[in-house]
């Protein structure tokens, strides 16, 4: 650690002058400096804490250790999802010991002074950061959105480190915090992608998964987008690209704030690599986003299952049109007020099939807005349920009877087979509603068919 | 850090009369320590969240080549981690539950695995040794049978 330069204030924290919690947080940060390729720390003015996710007794003990040592966050710090819906978990299959641990962990982060947003879409709250703001964020989709869509600056902070940054207000000065770390590493040219597909919401999650596959942990610069994506479209790209790859920042030429033109996105240099993507590649990803239940018996491990239960689930009939369906699952990342508005229009005066559950995950504040906006009444009349604070990927809430789910989310599509042991069908929001009404998979595939 | 400096040697394996080829690489001791065990090697990056069971040590990403294998107590060789920032939390659960890998070899220093090991040290006094070896040396591990990590030295038995 010869090359590390700490300020007097950093050193004081490291020496324990700001208390034992700050000392522990600073010690962890300093030990991490070499891996970030940094020699010094720098200030951040906000944080988003993904350490809130309960994964078992160890994550709870970490939170309680910091809280007991007197930790307080130094910058406004929003909270990512928790391990349970604090007030709704008992309606689901959540083991009581998991709920107990997850709620203890929630209390610990509240005690440290974090803002109780409990959402994986913090950029759709009043706490959205601003262009150029230096922040420390966990949660892969949020990291990608902050950097790419807003132009705020955060590295890919792992769980357990984001809270150290919030407690000290410091992060390693490296990577995406600095201008040179934000230049493109690969140009991804969309070629021959019809505008009518780009205008469909179901295009963007597929683009996201594809971006993650071709970019790895690089910074893709996308050309060939002919429409103006919405925040929800970009949210879907982030969720996909941060699931199939480690994309923390992408640029869309002429669309995202740091890419007014290609030259700026690449920092004035030539693209190191160029990848051309057409309908063949997109269609292949779209197909992969539907999968029958894992063939080995579906040994999906429940996400926060401190019990270590391996679940065996019933076989899916088929992840295909006409196939059996147990649940429609929406809201990863958490559903926005716009998405609630669209869904309310689609389900008005309709009723889901008795055999198909319909679950939407969102934040407490968006649920409240949807109620005020009058969107929740038709959705609840349709037979949908709402879960806040968390989602089935981070809370062991789904019954083992759920064999196949249908979703419009890149993230639910990508992770459900491994985390939940379910089959999955990817479709548009309209497809999801039609399928829930019909009781089996209904999909309009015309946008994806070969020309 | 060196690349392509494998020092080939012949070594016996005790009671077994068969001789195995062994090689020594020098890397970067990202988290210093000593560990040895059966090698579990993949060139594919892994997300521990959705990819590794913190309760059993099984690799549960059904798209990953190591799907179904158990990494508890083994030396896990991965180029780097991808996907979720929750990888560190799962790793910490695995350490607490006693089902973490005994040691880890990466292509380049990996922030997520390193943090998990450092926090495991802070919380439980049980850091998992991690060594990073780059490029050609990393690819040479594809057929490794057993691995031993000693600070920045990686010994490979094929």
Image (cartoon, coloured by chain):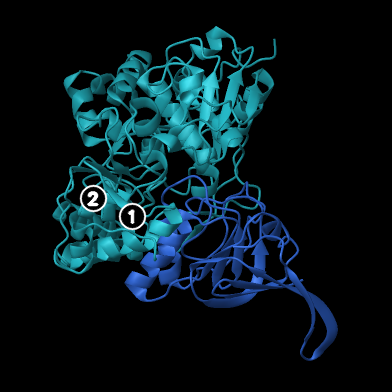
Chain colours: A cyan, B blue
Q: Which mark is residue A161?
A: 1
Find the residue positioned furthest to the bottom.
Answer: B15
Residue A139 x %, y %: 37, 43
User: Is residue A33 depicted above or below B104 in this figure?
Assistant: above
The quadrant the C terminus of chain A occupies is: top right
Q: Which of A376 and B145 is in front in this view?
A: B145
Chain to which the residue tagged by mark 1 belongs: A
Quarter occupied by residue B138:
bottom right
Quarter occupied by residue B36:
bottom right
Q: Residue at x 61, y 73 (%)?
A: B153
Q: Which of A232 and A404 is in front in this view?
A: A232
Chain to which the residue tagged by mark 2 belongs: A
Q: Residue at x 37, y 76 (%)?
A: B125
Residue A336 x %, y %: 31, 26
Quarter occupied by residue A121:
top left
Q: Which residue is drawn at 21% across and 33% down?
A: A127
Q: Which of A95 and B29 is in front in this view?
A: B29
Residue B62 seen anywhere in this rendered image of the structure: yes
In the picture of the structure, the residue carrying the numbered disc 2 is A166
Residue A248 x %, y %: 44, 38
Label 2 neighbour load within 10 Å: few <14, some 14-19, many 20+: many
Q: Is mark 2 on a helix, strand or loop?
A: helix
Q: How far apart are marks 1 and 2 (CA)?
A: 9 Å
Q: What element carries label 1?
A: loop
The quadrant the N terminus of chain A occupies is: bottom left
Residue A12 x %, y %: 18, 64
User: Mark 1 vs mark 2: which is more N-terminal?
Assistant: 1
User: Is residue A182 depicted above or below B31 in this figure?
Assistant: above
């Amino acid at each position: 650690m010869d090359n590390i330069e700490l300020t007097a204030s950093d050193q004081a924290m490291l020496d324990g002058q700001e208390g034992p919690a700050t000392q522990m947080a600073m010690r962890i940060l300093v030990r991490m400096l070499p891996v970030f390729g940094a020699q010094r720390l720098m200030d951040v003015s906000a944080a988003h804490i993904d350490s809130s996710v309960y994964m078992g007794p160890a994550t709870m003990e970490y939170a309680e250790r910091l809280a007991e040592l007197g930790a307080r966050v130094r910058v406004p710090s929003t909270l990512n999802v928790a391990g349970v819906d604090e007030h709704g978990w008992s309606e689901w299959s959540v083991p009581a010991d998991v709920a107990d641990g997850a709620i203890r962990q929630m209390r610990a982060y509240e005690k440290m002074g974090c803002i109780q947003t409990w959402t994986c879409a913090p950029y759709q709250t009043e706490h959205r950061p601003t262009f150029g703001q230096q922040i420390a964020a966990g949660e892969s989709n949020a990291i990608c959105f902050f950097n790419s869509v807003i132009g705020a600056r955060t590295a890919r902070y792992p769980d357990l480190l984001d809270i150290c940054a919030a407690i000290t207000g410091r992060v390693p000065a490296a990577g995406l915090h600095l201008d040179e770390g934000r230049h493109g590493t690969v140009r991804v040219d969309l070629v021959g992608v019809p505008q009518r597909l780009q205008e469909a919401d179901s295009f963007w999650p597929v683009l996201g998964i594809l971006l993650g596959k071709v970019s790895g942990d690089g910074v893709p610069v996308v050309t060939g987008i002919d429409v103006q994506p919405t925040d929800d479209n970009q949210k879907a790209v982030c969720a996909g690209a941060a699931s199939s790859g480690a994309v923390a920042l992408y640029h869309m030429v002429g669309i995202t704030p740091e890419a007014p033109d290609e030259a700026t996105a690449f920092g004035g240099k030539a693209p190191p690599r160029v990848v051309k993507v057409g309908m063949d590649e997109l269609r292949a990803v779209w197909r992969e986003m539907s999968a029958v239940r894992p063939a080995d018996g579906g040994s999906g491990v429940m996400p926060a299952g401190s019990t270590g239960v391996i679940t065996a689930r019933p076989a899916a009939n088929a992840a295909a049109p006409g196939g059996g369906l147990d649940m429609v699952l929406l809201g990863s990342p958490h559903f926005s007020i716009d998405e609630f508005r669209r869904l309310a229009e689609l389900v008005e005066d309709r009723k889901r099939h008795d055999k198909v559950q319909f679950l939407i995950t969102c934040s407490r504040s968006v649920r409240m807005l949807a109620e005020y906006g009058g969107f929740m009444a038709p959705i609840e009349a349709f037979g949908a349920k709402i879960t806040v604070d968390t989602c089935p990927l981070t809370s062991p809430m789904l019954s083992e009877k759920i064999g196949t789910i249908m979703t419009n989310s890149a993230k639910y599509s990508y992770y459900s087979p491994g985390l939940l042991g379910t089959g999955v069908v990817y479709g548009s929001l309209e497809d999801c509603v039609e399928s829930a009404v019909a009781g089996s998979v209904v999909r309009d595939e015309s946008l994806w068919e070969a020309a | 850090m060196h690349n392509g400096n494998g020092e080939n040697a012949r070594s016996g394996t005790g009671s077994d009369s068969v001789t195995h080829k062994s090689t020594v690489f020098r890397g970067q001791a990202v988290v210093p320590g000593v560990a040895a065990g059966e090698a579990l090697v993949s060139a594919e990056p892994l997300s521990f969240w959705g990819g590794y069971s913190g309760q059993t040590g099984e690799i549960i990403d059904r798209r990953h080549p190591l799907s179904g294998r158990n990494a508890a107590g083994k030396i896990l060789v991965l180029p780097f981690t991808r996907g979720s920032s929750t990888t560190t939390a799962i790793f910490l659960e695995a350490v607490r539950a006693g089902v973490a890998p005994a040691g880890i070899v990466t292509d380049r220093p990996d922030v997520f695995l390193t943090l998990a090991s450092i926090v495991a040290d802070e919380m439980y006094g049980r850091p998992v040794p991690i060594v990073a070896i780059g490029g050609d040396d990393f690819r040479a591990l594809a057929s490794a049978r057993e691995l031993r990590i000693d600070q920045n030295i990686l010994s490979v038995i094929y």
